[in-house]
Each structure stands twice: as C-alpha cells, then as structure tokens.
Image (cartoon, rainbow, N blue to C red):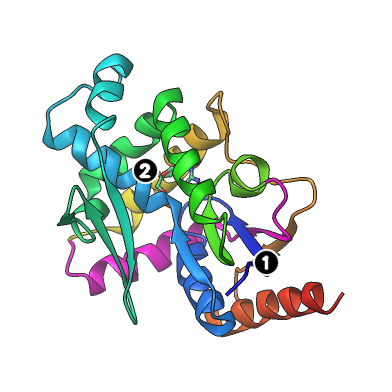
Amino acid sequence: MTREMRIAIDGPAAAGKSTIAKLVAKKLGYTYIDTGAMYRAITYKVLQNAVDPCNEEEVAKLISRTHIELEQGNEAQRVLLDGAEVSEAIRSHEVTSQVSAIAALTSVRQLLMKKQQNLAEERSVVMDGRDIGTTVLPDAELKIFMTASVEERAQRRLLEEQLRGMKSDYVTLKREITERDKADSEREISPLKKAEDAIIIDTTGKTIEQVTNMIVEYAEKRLAR
Ligand code: DC
C-alpha cells in the first residue's frame, strides 16, 4: 500500500494515546508505532547492563549496538530488543522511573528519531509519543494532542497495571505521572509540546470508542480533501 497518511498522536503520560492509536490504526489499516516503547526498550537495556543513565558516553556506546523491533500482533504489539521479547519487562516501575532521563539524551533521541522516520517513510502510520508532531513527523497530515486530567490518567493506569498483575497504588502512580510529564516537558531537546497545528482532544470523561471515532473522522475528512 502506498502512503496515504501519517497520524501523529502526542500528549502527556497515560492519556490513552497507545490504546487509541492502536485502534485507529486497526480501523484504517495503518501501521501502529509506539515510540514510547522504543525509549523504554533502550532504558531496559541500560538498566540490564548497569550503565549509569546520566553517563551519556556510556549509554551511547551501549545503544550503538542495539536492535529494536516492533512486531504487530493481532491484539498487542510485541517489542523485541536484540531479538528477545521485552514487551512486559519495559512496563516495570523501574523502567518507568528512569525512562525520562534516558529520553533526554541527544544520542538516544537522534538514534530513535531516525528509526521512527524510516518506519513512516513508505507506509501509512499512526505514531504516538511526545514529539511526533513537532519533531519526528513535522509534516504529518493529521496531528492530535491528547490530554486528560491527571486524576483520570492515574486511575486508568492503575486499572491497566492491576490487570497486568502489577502491585500499584493510585497515589504513587499520580506522583510518577506528574514527575514524568514535568521532566518530559522541560527537557532541552524535543520536549513534550503541542504542535501548533495539532488538534487538542481532552479524553477526560470520554470513552475509548468515542475518542477513536473522533480521530478516524478527522482522518477521513483529511483523506477526502
Ligand atoms: O508513552 P510512554 O509512557 O510509554 O513513554 C515513555 C517515555 O518515553 C516518556 O516518559 C518520555 C519518552 N518518550 C519521548 O521522550 N518521546 C517520545 N516520542 C515517546 C516517548
């Protein structure tokens, strides 16, 4: 299939981006790309190798030999790091607490940005992250900035983690989300920011289906132009 459209979905942590992006991609027949999973996979590797996340030189050396693949399953997406599946491992609290520091490093961002741009070169994609509309795909045909109240985001993440069998509590999750948003918004390169031409969708109080349909409608309108 030739490339019809690139949909960029950015926003703060736990706003529902990946759940919605996956469904939008399925409805439109596009490829879903979870860029947060890539930053998480790198962070996992750094932690596994006991490299200090603040030591950019060491991190750069380690990741120059890294292979990340996102495999599209029917329901979930599998994340492969150097050939081994890490889909679950990258969602741990340890990775979540370190990922913003790793994502602030220039070498990490350069490497992943190139990978992400290559993935969107020849196919229609729905890509979610923090800097897709501003930096990775500045010419994306449709840009969405998805938000929700921090209370609702913490509540949703709690349910998600409980379903996965993780031991989580609301207060800790709310604090983690707030800290991560602050770090992601204040970093120097490609911070979390709404692109000027992005459409804001506040998902507070909206169902997954409502938000998915809204985005599909925006996409269909763009295609009909
Ligand atoms: O979407 P997520 O919560 O899985 O993302 C994990 C972290 O990765 C997030 O806190 C910041 C970083 N990230 C980023 O800096 N740029 C992106 N495009 C996607 C994620």
- Ligand 1 within 8 Å of the CB at mark 2: yes
Q: Quadrant of residue 203?
A: bottom right
Q: Please determine whether, in this image, residue 6 is positioned above or below residue 207.
A: above
Magenta stretch: includes residue 34? no
Residue located 50% across and 49% down the image: 118
Tally of marks: 2
**Alpha carbon of mark 2 to alpha carbon of mark 1: how far?**
24 Å
215 with respect to 152 (left or right):
right
Q: Could you tell whether 158 is left or right of 135 in the image?
A: left
Identify which residue, 113 or 145, lies in the foreground.
113
Q: Quadrant of the C terminus?
A: bottom right
- The residue at which mark 1 appears reads as 5
196 shown above or below 30: above
- Describe the element under mark 2 as helix, strand or loop: helix
Q: Secondary structure at mark 1?
A: loop
Q: Is residue 165 magenta?
A: yes
Vertically, is 133 above or below 223? above
Q: Given this view, does label 2 or label 1 mark the residue nearer the observer?
A: 1
Amino acid type at image mark 2: Tyr
Residue range highlighted in magenta: 138-166
Image position, residue 182 (x, y; %): 51, 35
Q: Which mark is residue 39?
A: 2
Q: Quadrant of the N terminus?
A: bottom right
Along the viewing direction, whichever of 153 and 84 lies nearer the viewer:
84
The percent coordinates of residue 59 (x first, y second) are 27, 24
Left or right, 85 with respect to 99, comes to: left
Of the image marks 2 and 1, the number of the one nearer the N terminus: 1
Q: Position of residue 156 (x, y in %)?
A: 41, 68
Q: Residue at x 29, y 29 (%)?
A: 64
